[in-house]
Image (cartoon, rainbow, N blue to C red):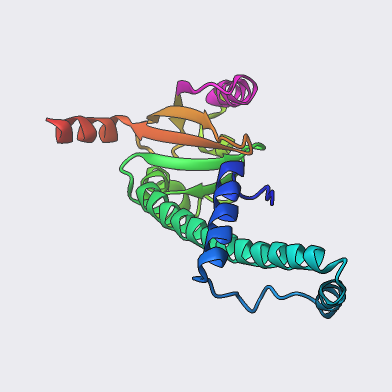
Amino acid sequence: MSDPILPWDLTIKLRQQAEQQLKTGSTQLNAVFTASTDALSALFRLSSEANTASDGLKLLHELQTYQVELDLQMEQLQHNESDANHQLACYRQFFDLSPIGCIIINLNGIITDCNAAAAGLFAHLTNDQTGQLCGISMQSLVTANCQPMLSASLARVQRSQQNATLIVTAVTGSGNSADPCNLRLTISLSPDQKAILLMLADDASEHRLAADEL
């Protein structure tokens, strides 16, 4: 049986495993996958007549094998889902706890996710370091003279699917007398080409990272 969800070689392996379990009698059929009344009636009719009995037995064996194979595929898919959820949780933790600011934007430049380090870089704008950047445009976080350069870099990354790095100046907020903050942006396109990851570091964070490495 071919299943697009599972690799072909794994499907063949599961079929062989199902046949082996039926041969040795070591399997228990899952009640979720049961033959319909019509299918069982057809098998009974075939097995009741001498000239079709062998065909009935073959169909019965195929049905049993198919049922066991479905059970094994379900177990494999549940195992794959568990592994995927574990990996997702790990990557989510790495994202949230990274000392480098990370921002995810959609292809229209709207922020869809960010970690605490990124939110902290713009806390003076949001008065909140818990993710209030989500839903706003990435362009709004950099000064007007840096916006064309950022737009060009984002478009180039989408077009070439190659990472890009640039220096931009973050906005300081109205009435903020602090010196402008320069940020180093590393821009990457997601594998499915539906989102863009930006890693941000200011001079202070780069110095802290360098000190930690010493």
Count up the numbered dots: 0
Identify the residue shown where x is 71% and y is 62%: 62
Q: Quadrant of residue 176?
A: top left
Identify the residue shown where x is 39% and y is 30%: 180
Relative to 87, residue 105 above or below = above
Relative to 68, residue 204 above or below = above
Front-most of 80 and 200?
A: 80
Q: Is residue 36 magenta?
A: no
User: What residue span does the magenta drawing correspond to?
Assistant: 146-166
The C terminus is located in which quarter?
Answer: top left
Q: Is residue 158 magenta?
A: yes
The kind of secondary structure the magenta stretch mainly shows is: helix
Front-most of 151 and 7?
A: 7
Identify the residue shown where x is 71% and y is 76%: 34
List the single residue furthest toward the front.
Answer: 50
| Residue 128 in view, yes or no | no
User: Percent position (x, y) of residue 126?
Assistant: 47, 52
Q: Quadrant of residue 56?
A: bottom right
